[in-house]
Amino acid sequence: MPCEPIGDDVDITPYRLTDPQPIGAALQAVAAGRHAVTLYSLEAGSFRIGRLTAVNLPAGHLVFEADAQRPVDPGPLLLVTALQGIKLQCLLAPDWQAGAGQPWRVTASLPEELVRLQRREFGRLDAPLGRPYLAEFVLNDQAYTLNVHDLSLGGVGLRASPHEAPALHVGRRLPKVTLELGRDQRLVVGLEIRLCRAFRSHLLGEQLHIGCRFFDQAAAQQAELKRLLSQLERERLALMGGRRTPRR
């Protein structure tokens, strides 16, 4: 199956790499692991699935070989792959060359920019059903109360309605957010919005998923959050029929 390009609704600004060294290192890891790579022809609308067989930093080029021996269509090429849950995407310059007598082999200059989309640095748990988890804060003199969709040691996913969207853009920082995490458990945290993605709910219609990361988090907050996540995981396993962790 082809690796789909990053959606147009995703703000890729925080994930752009322009330094040649990390770009080369990321592509070398793809080649070394023989991970599947999808090469899209932007003009023809076609794609080829294959592998990176070489990434030469001193020479400044890479080599792609398609699994099927069909010619790669001419024009600009978009390279997309996934590496350990991280999506990598880059545009190859249109001056690439097909191998002599091997039109499925492409040699191209290393890209000047690479998008390294890593949304989930930490393990994530969904908020439990039937127990509302909330995020409350004030922005531009307006009070907000949003549902917490998921929670991790790195941040939270919030659910918002479209009329709340204009104020909740990628890059905005919310310095004092009160998280209501059930059973009278509250945390005051700083959140930075990293992702805004639209989706449709059967009950609520169009909604937004707001992905946020914590910043300026104190050690005591981290410890309390870890405790809450452990408790959530125990409850989730119990509901699934797993063995309940003994209480100490």
Image: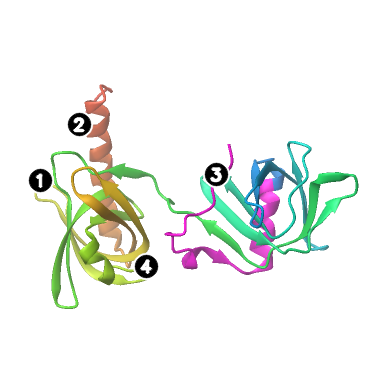
Q: Is residue 233 left or right of residue 31?
A: left
Disc 2 element: loop
Q: Quadrant of the C terminus?
A: top left
Q: Is residue 242 left or right of residue 72?
A: left
Q: Is residue 3 magenta?
A: yes
Residue 79 visible (yes or no): yes
Q: Position of residue 135 (x, y in %)?
A: 19, 58
The residue identified by callout 4 is 170
**Is the residue marked by circle 4 packed among few (<14), some (14-19), or many (20+) residues within 10 Å?**
some
- Sequence-first tag of 1 and 3: 3
Q: Amino acid at mark 1?
A: Arg
Mark seen at residue 183: 1
- Sequence-first tag of 1 and 2: 1
Disc 1 element: loop
Relative depth, front residue between 187 and 137: 137
The residue identified by callout 2 is 247
In this picture, which residue range is highlighted in magenta?
A: 1-30
Q: Amino acid at mark 3?
A: Gln
Taking the spot 74% from the left edge, 63% from the top edge, the residue there is: 94
Mark seen at residue 84: 3
Disc 4 element: loop
Taking the spot 51% from the left edge, 63% from the top edge, the residue there is: 15
Instruction: Give the spatial CA distance, label 4 vs label 3.
Output: 25 Å
- Sequence-first tag of 4 and 3: 3
Q: Is residue 16 left or right of residue 162?
A: right
Taking the spot 26% from the left edge, 51% from the top edge, the residue there is: 225
Instruction: Give the spatial CA distance, label 1 vs label 2.
Output: 18 Å
* Tag 4 and tag 2, C-beta contact below 8 Å: no
